[in-house]
Amino acid sequence: MENSKMIQWWEIEPNVHLKLTKEYLIFLRNSRKNSGISLNNIAEELKVHEGTIQSWENGSRGITIGHLIKLLGVLGLSKLNLDSKIEGIYTAGKRFMISKPNLPLEIKEEHIQILAHGMFDGTEEHASSGKIGLVYESGKKLEQEMFKELVLNCNFGEFRMNKNWHAYYRFPATLTQILMYYYKFNSLHSRKAVFPVKIMEEIKYNKKLRKLILKAAFVDEGSCGYNKVRDNVCVFSSVNPILIQQIVYILRLMGYSFFTNKPKNNCESIYLHAESLPKFYKDVVVLLPKEYYKRINVELLLKKQERESRIQTQLKLLKELVKEQGYIKIFQVQNLLNLHEASARRRISRLIKDDTVTKKRRGFYEAI
Protein backbone atom coordinates (compact mmCIF):
# COMPACT_ATOMS: atom_id res chain seq x y z
CA MET A 1 0.00 0.00 0.00
CA GLU A 2 1.04 3.63 -0.39
CA ASN A 3 3.03 4.56 2.69
CA SER A 4 2.52 8.29 2.03
CA LYS A 5 -1.27 8.05 2.53
CA MET A 6 -2.77 8.35 5.98
CA ILE A 7 -6.04 7.16 7.53
CA GLN A 8 -7.67 10.24 9.09
CA TRP A 9 -9.79 9.90 12.22
CA TRP A 10 -12.98 10.74 10.31
CA GLU A 11 -12.33 7.88 7.85
CA ILE A 12 -12.74 5.36 10.66
CA GLU A 13 -15.97 3.45 11.25
CA PRO A 14 -18.66 5.92 12.47
CA ASN A 15 -19.62 3.67 15.42
CA VAL A 16 -16.12 3.78 16.92
CA HIS A 17 -16.05 5.76 20.19
CA LEU A 18 -13.57 8.51 21.03
CA LYS A 19 -12.29 9.64 24.39
CA LEU A 20 -11.56 13.37 24.05
CA THR A 21 -9.37 15.55 26.27
CA LYS A 22 -11.07 17.54 29.05
CA GLU A 23 -9.90 20.78 27.46
CA TYR A 24 -11.54 19.96 24.15
CA LEU A 25 -14.78 18.85 25.87
CA ILE A 26 -14.92 22.22 27.62
CA PHE A 27 -14.30 23.89 24.25
CA LEU A 28 -17.21 21.95 22.70
CA ARG A 29 -19.54 22.89 25.57
CA ASN A 30 -18.61 26.56 25.35
CA SER A 31 -18.98 26.48 21.56
CA ARG A 32 -22.48 25.05 21.94
CA LYS A 33 -23.49 27.70 24.45
CA ASN A 34 -22.00 30.52 22.37
CA SER A 35 -23.58 29.27 19.14
CA GLY A 36 -27.04 30.34 20.21
CA ILE A 37 -28.40 26.92 19.20
CA SER A 38 -30.45 25.31 21.93
CA LEU A 39 -29.49 21.95 23.43
CA ASN A 40 -32.87 20.64 22.30
CA ASN A 41 -32.22 21.64 18.67
CA ILE A 42 -28.81 19.93 18.69
CA ALA A 43 -30.37 16.82 20.21
CA GLU A 44 -33.01 16.70 17.50
CA GLU A 45 -30.40 17.24 14.77
CA LEU A 46 -28.22 14.41 16.09
CA LYS A 47 -31.26 12.26 17.02
CA VAL A 48 -30.10 11.71 20.60
CA HIS A 49 -31.37 12.72 24.04
CA GLU A 50 -30.24 16.00 25.60
CA GLY A 51 -28.75 14.04 28.46
CA THR A 52 -26.54 12.15 26.00
CA ILE A 53 -25.01 15.40 24.77
CA GLN A 54 -24.39 16.52 28.35
CA SER A 55 -22.71 13.18 29.14
CA TRP A 56 -20.43 13.71 26.12
CA GLU A 57 -19.51 17.16 27.37
CA ASN A 58 -18.68 16.05 30.91
CA GLY A 59 -16.70 13.03 29.67
CA SER A 60 -18.82 10.36 31.36
CA ARG A 61 -19.66 8.84 27.97
CA GLY A 62 -17.54 8.53 24.85
CA ILE A 63 -18.81 10.09 21.65
CA THR A 64 -18.91 8.14 18.41
CA ILE A 65 -17.08 9.42 15.36
CA GLY A 66 -20.35 9.70 13.47
CA HIS A 67 -21.96 11.85 16.18
CA LEU A 68 -18.84 14.01 16.58
CA ILE A 69 -18.75 14.79 12.84
CA LYS A 70 -22.43 15.80 12.96
CA LEU A 71 -21.89 17.88 16.12
CA LEU A 72 -18.96 19.73 14.57
CA GLY A 73 -21.09 20.41 11.51
CA VAL A 74 -23.95 21.87 13.60
CA LEU A 75 -21.54 24.05 15.58
CA GLY A 76 -19.61 25.11 12.46
CA LEU A 77 -16.31 23.72 13.79
CA SER A 78 -13.51 22.16 11.74
CA LYS A 79 -12.69 18.45 11.96
CA LEU A 80 -9.06 19.17 11.09
CA ASN A 81 -6.24 19.22 13.66
CA LEU A 82 -8.32 17.26 16.15
CA ASP A 83 -5.90 14.32 16.39
CA SER A 84 -4.09 15.68 19.43
CA LYS A 85 -7.44 16.04 21.25
CA ILE A 86 -8.14 12.26 21.05
CA GLU A 87 -6.93 10.41 24.15
CA GLY A 88 -8.40 7.01 23.34
CA ILE A 89 -10.39 5.03 20.82
CA TYR A 90 -12.55 1.95 21.35
CA THR A 91 -15.37 -0.13 19.85
CA ALA A 92 -16.80 -2.64 22.34
CA GLY A 93 -16.46 -0.91 25.70
CA LYS A 94 -13.64 1.00 27.35
CA ARG A 95 -11.77 -2.15 28.30
CA PHE A 96 -10.95 -2.47 24.57
CA MET A 97 -9.70 1.12 24.40
CA ILE A 98 -6.38 1.91 22.75
CA SER A 99 -4.80 4.83 24.59
CA LYS A 100 -2.97 7.65 22.82
CA PRO A 101 -3.62 6.38 19.27
CA ASN A 102 -1.16 7.58 16.64
CA LEU A 103 -3.63 9.45 14.45
CA PRO A 104 -3.70 9.96 11.55
CA LEU A 105 -2.77 6.30 11.04
CA GLU A 106 -0.07 5.64 8.46
CA ILE A 107 -1.05 3.12 5.78
CA LYS A 108 1.28 0.13 6.02
CA GLU A 109 1.66 -3.16 4.18
CA GLU A 110 1.36 -4.91 7.54
CA HIS A 111 -2.36 -4.01 7.60
CA ILE A 112 -3.20 -6.24 4.64
CA GLN A 113 -0.94 -9.03 5.87
CA ILE A 114 -2.71 -9.07 9.25
CA LEU A 115 -6.16 -9.09 7.63
CA ALA A 116 -5.01 -11.81 5.21
CA HIS A 117 -3.87 -13.97 8.15
CA GLY A 118 -7.33 -13.51 9.64
CA MET A 119 -8.96 -14.64 6.39
CA PHE A 120 -6.68 -17.57 5.64
CA ASP A 121 -6.57 -18.99 9.16
CA GLY A 122 -10.04 -17.85 10.23
CA THR A 123 -12.62 -19.62 12.33
CA GLU A 124 -15.73 -18.25 14.02
CA GLU A 125 -13.69 -16.74 16.84
CA HIS A 126 -11.17 -15.34 14.37
CA ALA A 127 -13.85 -13.77 12.25
CA SER A 128 -14.19 -10.39 13.99
CA SER A 129 -17.75 -10.16 12.70
CA GLY A 130 -18.72 -8.97 16.18
CA LYS A 131 -16.75 -6.66 18.41
CA ILE A 132 -13.84 -9.00 19.10
CA GLY A 133 -10.25 -8.82 18.02
CA LEU A 134 -8.65 -11.01 15.42
CA VAL A 135 -7.17 -14.08 17.11
CA TYR A 136 -4.20 -15.67 15.36
CA GLU A 137 -3.84 -19.33 16.21
CA SER A 138 -0.64 -21.26 15.67
CA GLY A 139 1.13 -23.95 17.65
CA LYS A 140 4.45 -22.98 16.04
CA LYS A 141 6.33 -20.34 17.99
CA LEU A 142 8.05 -18.85 14.94
CA GLU A 143 4.69 -18.23 13.22
CA GLN A 144 3.46 -16.54 16.40
CA GLU A 145 6.52 -14.31 16.42
CA MET A 146 6.04 -13.36 12.76
CA PHE A 147 2.45 -12.29 13.49
CA LYS A 148 3.52 -10.40 16.61
CA GLU A 149 6.09 -8.48 14.56
CA LEU A 150 3.38 -7.44 12.08
CA VAL A 151 1.23 -6.13 14.95
CA LEU A 152 4.03 -4.18 16.59
CA ASN A 153 5.00 -2.61 13.26
CA CYS A 154 1.51 -1.06 13.02
CA ASN A 155 2.51 1.39 15.78
CA PHE A 156 -1.07 2.47 16.42
CA GLY A 157 -0.77 3.37 20.07
CA GLU A 158 -0.42 1.84 23.51
CA PHE A 159 -1.84 -1.68 23.55
CA ARG A 160 -0.76 -5.13 24.67
CA MET A 161 -0.63 -8.34 22.72
CA ASN A 162 -2.85 -10.56 24.85
CA LYS A 163 -1.39 -14.05 24.99
CA ASN A 164 -4.16 -16.37 26.17
CA TRP A 165 -2.11 -19.52 25.82
CA HIS A 166 0.79 -20.78 23.74
CA ALA A 167 -1.18 -21.00 20.46
CA TYR A 168 -2.99 -17.65 20.48
CA TYR A 169 -2.23 -13.99 19.82
CA ARG A 170 -5.02 -11.45 19.84
CA PHE A 171 -4.98 -8.42 17.58
CA PRO A 172 -6.71 -5.47 19.31
CA ALA A 173 -10.47 -5.45 18.71
CA THR A 174 -10.58 -1.71 18.02
CA LEU A 175 -7.78 -1.84 15.50
CA THR A 176 -9.31 -4.93 13.86
CA GLN A 177 -12.56 -3.08 13.27
CA ILE A 178 -10.81 0.08 12.04
CA LEU A 179 -8.75 -1.77 9.44
CA MET A 180 -11.69 -3.92 8.31
CA TYR A 181 -13.82 -0.80 7.82
CA TYR A 182 -11.14 1.24 6.03
CA TYR A 183 -10.11 -1.55 3.65
CA LYS A 184 -13.76 -2.65 3.15
CA PHE A 185 -13.44 -6.18 4.58
CA ASN A 186 -16.93 -7.48 5.41
CA SER A 187 -15.69 -10.57 7.23
CA LEU A 188 -12.53 -12.43 8.21
CA HIS A 189 -14.24 -15.81 8.40
CA SER A 190 -12.30 -18.22 6.19
CA ARG A 191 -15.43 -19.76 4.66
CA LYS A 192 -16.92 -16.50 3.39
CA ALA A 193 -14.18 -13.84 3.47
CA VAL A 194 -12.76 -12.48 0.20
CA PHE A 195 -10.44 -9.66 -0.71
CA PRO A 196 -12.52 -6.52 -1.34
CA VAL A 197 -12.50 -4.68 -4.67
CA LYS A 198 -10.29 -1.99 -3.13
CA ILE A 199 -7.50 -4.51 -2.47
CA MET A 200 -7.92 -6.39 -5.77
CA GLU A 201 -7.46 -3.10 -7.64
CA GLU A 202 -4.29 -2.42 -5.67
CA ILE A 203 -3.00 -5.93 -6.41
CA LYS A 204 -3.05 -5.20 -10.16
CA TYR A 205 -0.32 -2.60 -9.83
CA ASN A 206 1.47 -3.42 -6.59
CA LYS A 207 3.84 -6.35 -7.08
CA LYS A 208 5.12 -6.20 -3.50
CA LEU A 209 1.60 -6.48 -2.13
CA ARG A 210 1.04 -9.60 -4.25
CA LYS A 211 4.15 -11.18 -2.76
CA LEU A 212 3.11 -10.34 0.80
CA ILE A 213 -0.35 -11.86 0.31
CA LEU A 214 1.18 -15.03 -1.14
CA LYS A 215 3.55 -15.12 1.83
CA ALA A 216 0.60 -15.03 4.27
CA ALA A 217 -1.24 -17.66 2.20
CA PHE A 218 1.77 -20.00 2.18
CA VAL A 219 2.42 -19.59 5.94
CA ASP A 220 -1.21 -20.22 6.94
CA GLU A 221 -2.53 -22.68 4.35
CA GLY A 222 0.46 -23.79 2.30
CA SER A 223 2.58 -26.89 2.71
CA CYS A 224 5.72 -28.63 1.53
CA GLY A 225 5.94 -31.22 4.28
CA TYR A 226 6.88 -30.97 7.94
CA ASN A 227 8.63 -34.14 9.07
CA LYS A 228 9.40 -35.12 5.48
CA VAL A 229 9.88 -32.91 2.44
CA ARG A 230 7.21 -33.38 -0.22
CA ASP A 231 7.84 -33.59 -3.96
CA ASN A 232 5.72 -30.49 -4.61
CA VAL A 233 4.68 -27.24 -2.95
CA CYS A 234 1.10 -26.43 -2.04
CA VAL A 235 0.75 -22.64 -2.12
CA PHE A 236 -2.74 -22.45 -0.63
CA SER A 237 -5.75 -24.54 0.41
CA SER A 238 -9.27 -23.37 1.18
CA VAL A 239 -12.91 -24.39 1.27
CA ASN A 240 -13.73 -20.89 -0.01
CA PRO A 241 -13.91 -21.10 -3.85
CA ILE A 242 -13.82 -17.31 -4.35
CA LEU A 243 -10.71 -17.01 -2.19
CA ILE A 244 -9.10 -19.79 -4.26
CA GLN A 245 -9.95 -17.85 -7.44
CA GLN A 246 -8.38 -14.68 -6.03
CA ILE A 247 -5.11 -16.45 -5.15
CA VAL A 248 -5.14 -18.06 -8.62
CA TYR A 249 -5.54 -14.56 -10.09
CA ILE A 250 -2.47 -13.33 -8.17
CA LEU A 251 -0.41 -16.34 -9.30
CA ARG A 252 -1.36 -15.70 -12.92
CA LEU A 253 -0.43 -12.02 -12.62
CA MET A 254 3.00 -13.11 -11.42
CA GLY A 255 3.47 -15.64 -14.21
CA TYR A 256 3.52 -18.84 -12.17
CA SER A 257 2.82 -22.29 -13.58
CA PHE A 258 0.49 -24.20 -11.27
CA PHE A 259 -2.51 -26.49 -11.05
CA THR A 260 -5.46 -26.96 -8.70
CA ASN A 261 -6.66 -30.32 -7.48
CA LYS A 262 -10.27 -31.42 -7.45
CA PRO A 263 -11.97 -30.41 -4.21
CA LYS A 264 -11.69 -33.07 -1.54
CA ASN A 265 -14.03 -32.61 1.40
CA ASN A 266 -14.85 -29.24 -0.19
CA CYS A 267 -11.22 -28.17 0.20
CA GLU A 268 -9.33 -27.16 -2.96
CA SER A 269 -5.54 -26.75 -3.12
CA ILE A 270 -3.16 -24.93 -5.45
CA TYR A 271 0.13 -26.65 -6.33
CA LEU A 272 3.15 -25.21 -8.12
CA HIS A 273 4.66 -26.91 -11.14
CA ALA A 274 8.33 -27.70 -10.65
CA GLU A 275 9.51 -25.04 -13.12
CA SER A 276 7.89 -22.28 -11.02
CA LEU A 277 9.50 -23.31 -7.74
CA PRO A 278 12.71 -21.24 -8.19
CA LYS A 279 10.64 -18.12 -8.93
CA PHE A 280 8.34 -18.78 -5.96
CA TYR A 281 11.39 -19.14 -3.74
CA LYS A 282 12.85 -15.86 -4.99
CA ASP A 283 9.55 -13.95 -4.75
CA VAL A 284 7.99 -15.33 -1.58
CA VAL A 285 10.00 -17.89 0.39
CA VAL A 286 13.01 -15.59 0.92
CA LEU A 287 10.67 -13.26 2.83
CA LEU A 288 10.36 -15.94 5.54
CA PRO A 289 12.88 -16.42 8.37
CA LYS A 290 15.81 -18.67 7.49
CA GLU A 291 15.02 -21.03 10.35
CA TYR A 292 11.35 -21.45 9.35
CA TYR A 293 10.71 -25.08 8.43
CA LYS A 294 8.76 -24.26 5.25
CA ARG A 295 11.66 -22.21 3.91
CA ILE A 296 14.12 -24.97 4.82
CA ASN A 297 11.97 -27.61 3.10
CA VAL A 298 11.56 -25.53 -0.06
CA GLU A 299 15.34 -25.08 -0.19
CA LEU A 300 15.79 -28.85 0.17
CA LEU A 301 13.26 -29.43 -2.60
CA LEU A 302 15.08 -26.93 -4.83
CA LYS A 303 18.37 -28.75 -4.23
CA LYS A 304 16.65 -32.01 -5.10
CA GLN A 305 15.31 -30.50 -8.32
CA GLU A 306 18.71 -29.05 -9.21
CA ARG A 307 20.34 -32.42 -8.62
CA GLU A 308 17.76 -34.19 -10.79
CA SER A 309 18.23 -31.59 -13.52
CA ARG A 310 21.99 -32.13 -13.40
CA ILE A 311 21.51 -35.91 -13.63
CA GLN A 312 19.21 -35.53 -16.63
CA THR A 313 21.88 -33.44 -18.38
CA GLN A 314 24.46 -36.13 -17.63
CA LEU A 315 22.17 -38.89 -18.92
CA LYS A 316 21.66 -36.95 -22.14
CA LEU A 317 25.43 -36.85 -22.68
CA LEU A 318 25.72 -40.57 -21.99
CA LYS A 319 22.89 -41.42 -24.41
CA GLU A 320 24.63 -39.42 -27.13
CA LEU A 321 27.83 -41.36 -26.46
CA VAL A 322 25.99 -44.69 -26.61
CA LYS A 323 24.34 -43.68 -29.87
CA GLU A 324 27.69 -42.69 -31.36
CA GLN A 325 29.76 -45.78 -30.44
CA GLY A 326 27.09 -48.41 -29.69
CA TYR A 327 28.34 -49.22 -26.23
CA ILE A 328 29.61 -47.60 -23.04
CA LYS A 329 32.07 -48.53 -20.30
CA ILE A 330 32.09 -47.62 -16.64
CA PHE A 331 35.47 -45.83 -16.83
CA GLN A 332 34.12 -43.72 -19.73
CA VAL A 333 31.24 -42.55 -17.52
CA GLN A 334 33.69 -41.74 -14.72
CA ASN A 335 35.99 -39.74 -16.96
CA LEU A 336 33.26 -37.94 -18.91
CA LEU A 337 31.27 -36.85 -15.87
CA ASN A 338 34.09 -36.76 -13.30
CA LEU A 339 32.27 -39.17 -10.96
CA HIS A 340 33.25 -41.87 -8.50
CA GLU A 341 32.65 -45.45 -9.62
CA ALA A 342 29.55 -45.82 -7.40
CA SER A 343 27.96 -42.69 -8.92
CA ALA A 344 28.90 -43.84 -12.42
CA ARG A 345 27.17 -47.19 -11.83
CA ARG A 346 24.03 -45.36 -10.67
CA ARG A 347 24.00 -43.42 -13.95
CA ILE A 348 24.36 -46.69 -15.86
CA SER A 349 21.45 -48.12 -13.85
CA ARG A 350 19.32 -45.20 -15.05
CA LEU A 351 20.31 -45.99 -18.66
CA ILE A 352 19.34 -49.64 -18.16
CA LYS A 353 16.02 -48.59 -16.68
CA ASP A 354 15.42 -46.31 -19.70
CA ASP A 355 16.13 -49.27 -22.05
CA THR A 356 19.14 -47.46 -23.49
CA VAL A 357 21.78 -50.14 -22.75
CA THR A 358 22.04 -53.71 -21.51
CA LYS A 359 24.88 -55.34 -19.60
CA LYS A 360 27.18 -57.59 -21.62
CA ARG A 361 29.96 -58.16 -19.14
CA ARG A 362 31.48 -56.48 -16.11
CA GLY A 363 32.02 -52.76 -16.78
CA PHE A 364 30.78 -53.06 -20.42
CA TYR A 365 27.28 -52.14 -21.60
CA GLU A 366 25.92 -52.41 -25.10
CA ALA A 367 23.27 -50.27 -26.77
CA ILE A 368 19.84 -51.82 -27.18
Image (cartoon, helix red, strand yellow):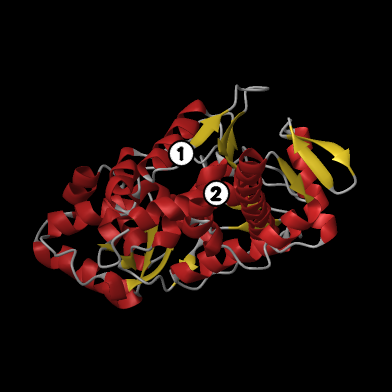
Query: From what the image shows, is residue 163 above or below residue 205?
Result: below
Residue sitting at x 38%, y 63%: 108
- Amino acid type shown at disc 2: Leu
Residue 51, label in figure: none
Whether residue 117 appears in this view of the structure is no
Position of the N terminus by quadrant: bottom left
Q: Nearer the viewer, residue 58 or 18?
A: 18
- Whole-percent x and y of residue 106? 33, 67
Considering depth in this image, is 46 or 86 the residue closer to the camera?
86
Task: Say which quarter of the image contains residue 360.
Answer: top right
Which quarter shows the C terminus? top right
Q: Amino acid at mark 1?
A: Ile
Counting from the top left corner in percent of width and height, residue 147 is at 58, 61
Q: Tell me residue 150's x, y (percent).
A: 52, 64
Residue behind mark 1: 247
Q: What kind of element bears circle 1?
A: helix
Tag 1: Cα neighbours inside 10 Å, few (<14), some, or many (≥20)?
many
> Image point 67% across, 50% down: which residue?
311
Judge left or right: residue 203 versus residue 242: left
Q: Nearer the viewer, residue 99 or 25?
A: 99
Residue picked out by circle 2: 277
Left or right: residue 209 compared with residue 174: left
Residue neighbourhood size for the residue with mark 2, other residues' Cα within 10 Å, grouped as few (<14), some (14–19), many (≥20): many
Of 43 and 83, the residue lying toward us: 83
Q: Residue at x 76, y 41 (%)?
A: 350
